Image: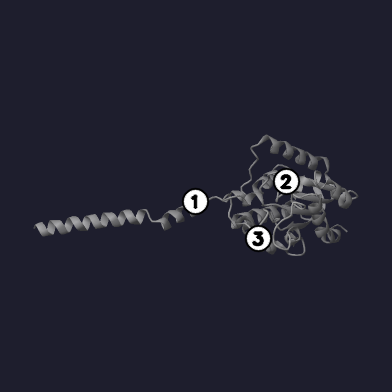
Amino acid sequence: MKKYALFLLLTIAALTASNGQTVATPSTDNAAASATRTNTAIVPVQRPDQGARARTTVVLQRAKDNQGACDIVFIGDSITHGWENAGRNVWNKYYGSRKCLNFGVGGDRTQHVLWRFENGQLDGVKPKAAVLMIGTNNSNREDNTEGEILEGVQTIVKQMRDRMPDTKILVLGIFPRGEKFTPQRGKILQVNQALARVADDKNVFYLDFGSELVQDDGSISRDVMPDFLHLSERGYEIWAQAIEPKLAELVK
């Protein structure tokens, strides 16, 4: 009887330990986390900071003030916004004789561009071509995965096609960043590799000239990116030269 009681107690203890182990397995926890994760890169949201809201108001008003036909719109984050600062001389050189609009907002991520679209950024604007470069801010830390960033940019392109069906879209690969090789650069390269497939070469085109922004050893020069993210005047010249042949073709 004592042996049976001891056997029963050991069996119950083993089952309890087994059940506890099953509930706490990392694979189960990871699966649950994956199932509940929301891709923030595709959920339209307004920027919370006042500086960004002020700039967003400027570019939304710029769209209202320029209804109808124009040549080119540029859509993006601070790197696009920078055409008005470090890039202004290059802008005047290449785009001064064209009707071009800058819809760049510093700090924007894909979800912020989608919010702008929902709040009139493209309403009534009819450009011949649109240049899109977005996603670098989504690549910070663990905020978004490569797949999430890709889906964010793809969603923007789809909305641009829906909202401006007669506009030719030039999607640019996300620019390299960081002085030397980093995991973040690798993350961006993986996004770009898949993003290239967004092009149909009829209405949507893709161009990646990131190799022109780095040196032979893979590093980035301060002459091109003073902070290894934002472009200098020389950097904007590289950008303008790289896209000009395709833009000239699209806006003729």
- Which amino acid type is shown beneath numbered disc 3? Leu
Q: Real-space Cα distance between discs 1 and 2?
A: 31 Å
Q: Which residue is mark 2?
A: 78
Which numbered disc, 1 or 3, marks the residue closer to the eye?
A: 3
Pick the front one: 208 or 128: 208
The picture places residue 4, in percent across and down from the top left corner, at 12, 59
Residue 131 in view of the camera: yes
Query: Left or right: 14 with respect to 56?
Result: left
Circle 3 Cα neighbour tier, 10 Å, few/some/many (<14 / 14–19 / ≥20): some
Q: Which mark is residue 116?
A: none
Q: Which residue is mark 1?
A: 36
- The residue at the far right in this view is 97
Q: Secondary structure at mark 1?
A: helix
- Residue at the image position 23 percent from the left and 55 percent from the top: 13
State the colouring used for the structure image: one colour
- The residue at the far left in this view is 1
